Amino acid sequence: MGGPASQELRSQRVLVVGLARSGVAAVELLLRSGASVVATDLRSADELGVDSLGWCDRGVELRLGDQTADMLTGIDLVVLSPGVPLDSPLPRAARDRNVRTIGELELAYGASSGRWLAVTGTNGKTTTTALLGELVKTTGRTVAVAGNIGVALSGEVEAVPADGFVVAEVSSFQLDTIESFEPYVGVLLNITEDHLDRYESFSAYGRSKARVFENQSASDFAVLNFDDPRVAALEADLAATVIPVSAEREVRHGVFLRGDTIVSQVGGKEREIVAAGDVGIPGPHNLSNALAATAAAVAVGVAPADVARVLTGFRSLEHRLEEVGEIDGALYVNDSKATNVDSVSFALRSFDAPIVLIAGGKDKGTDYSSLRGLLVERVRRLVLIGEAAEKMERTFEGAVPVERAASLGEAVRAAHRAAAPGDVVLLSPACASFDMFDDFEDRGRQFKDLVAALDRRERGSAGGGGQ
């Protein structure tokens, strides 16, 4: 549990680096705490739209555009937004000058009083965080669901009292800049290849994920997915009480499947929760997410009956295997959040029907070859977009018919031409979105708009006759 840090911050001059969602919330928290704030971003004021916040009138010194080491003069603390790489010039200069540097996660933790439940992993963390938030709301306590899920922590945590919960989705980027962050419950879902454009190795990426447990003690809980060998291997080194989860075998003192039933042995008492087939989110990966959320919820006192009710009523989130509509008998699915190979693998395994797959975007140093077998088995046609298209086409040469598209709109039209009744047209990119879109949400919403426009056009064609 963190604690209010206003007194410490009141006397400090703080530099906030990066003014996207998290950076803006950090500035606002610092202003409420009485800190003297300098805010910087490589983008201009017009690009950021920060003028409307009235920061200059409230004493914020804005330094936009070029970032130089002289910004650090007189600075007591640097707060980095998650999107700012640690090896970029300003953070490097701060380390060279021994200026304390933390991330927005650590800042928010220091300003909070509630108990933290933190979820991380390469895949599934947003769904698991949202589900866990719904589960702990059944306790009647104040709950904030924030973090990498799309709501900045710094804007939410101060409203949570000591008996409430902060349910946080935390990324490896956020964990890279922690100091004292100690969640009461930490959840690690999986560690698979991702972000190799930002980390020197897969091992380094894995170490960042494991930092969610770094400051825990025996009075805390660590929920580990034992079906991932890399995650299970962490058990021996953790100070926290480990709660294992598995969809493949029974695990003592954990949450697992027995036949088709989710069973909890958390706290030493066995309870049957609900039939796996009644869980409201589809796919085997989401069953693993449900087991992890159940383990964390039971650990903080959520009643099994409430767990069952929430699990059966919960539905998939936007941009995560989201069914968009049906055109000419083919189902269109938005899985824009699938920005790595494992996410796409999960998506391809979630459908029995032939798939027309739209993939591509900004490459993150990924090896796509592990998808080749699934493409041969399940994909009728592959439509590629973005900077990674050429690399992906080389990787999948001979495995599946491939078509390149210059835009997402062109890709949707190409997929429509290729799809037969009963097929699934699936946007599951395996790449970041920043080459063509603001973020994965922008990509997903554009896909949905394009599908809706295509549907209107097809319905108009079908209904249009003579005059």
Image (tube, rainbow, N blue to C red):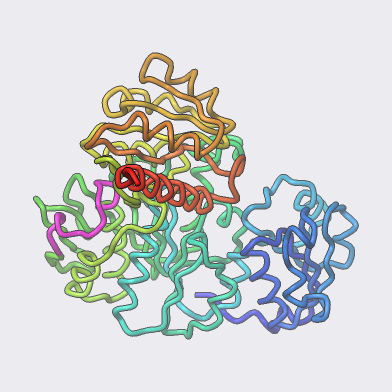
Is residue 101 or residue 240 the one in the foreground? 101
Magenta stretch contains residue 277: yes
Residue in the image at 33% along x and 43% along y: 466
Q: Give the side of residue 100 with respect to residue 83, left or right.
A: right
Residue in the image at 27% along x and 58% along y: 290
Magenta stretch contains residue 89: no
Residue in the image at 72% along x and 65% along y: 49
Q: Quadrant of residue 252?
A: bottom left
- When the figure is inspected, residue 370 is found, relative to residue 122, above or below; the finding is above
**Is any atom of residue 295 visible in this view?**
yes
- When the figure is inspected, residue 378 is found, relative to residue 39, above or below; the finding is above
- When the figure is inspected, residue 435 is found, relative to residue 95, above or below; the finding is above
Q: Which residues are magenta?
A: 274-286
Residue 277 in percent (x, y) is at 14, 55
**Is any atom of residue 122 visible in this view?**
no
Q: How many marks?
A: 0
Is residue 326 or residue 226 the one in the foreground? 326
- When the figure is inspected, residue 222 is found, relative to residue 419, above or below; the finding is below
Q: Give the side of residue 125 with respect to residue 286, left or right.
A: right
Q: Which residue extends farthest left?
A: 259
Q: Which residue extends farthest front?
A: 467
Q: Give the side of residue 321 with respect to residue 112, left or right.
A: left
Residue 117 in percent (x, y) is at 42, 68
Residue 64 in percent (x, y) is at 82, 59
Residue 329 in percent (x, y) is at 24, 41
Q: Quadrant of residue 399?
A: top left
Q: Quadrant of residue 271?
A: bottom left
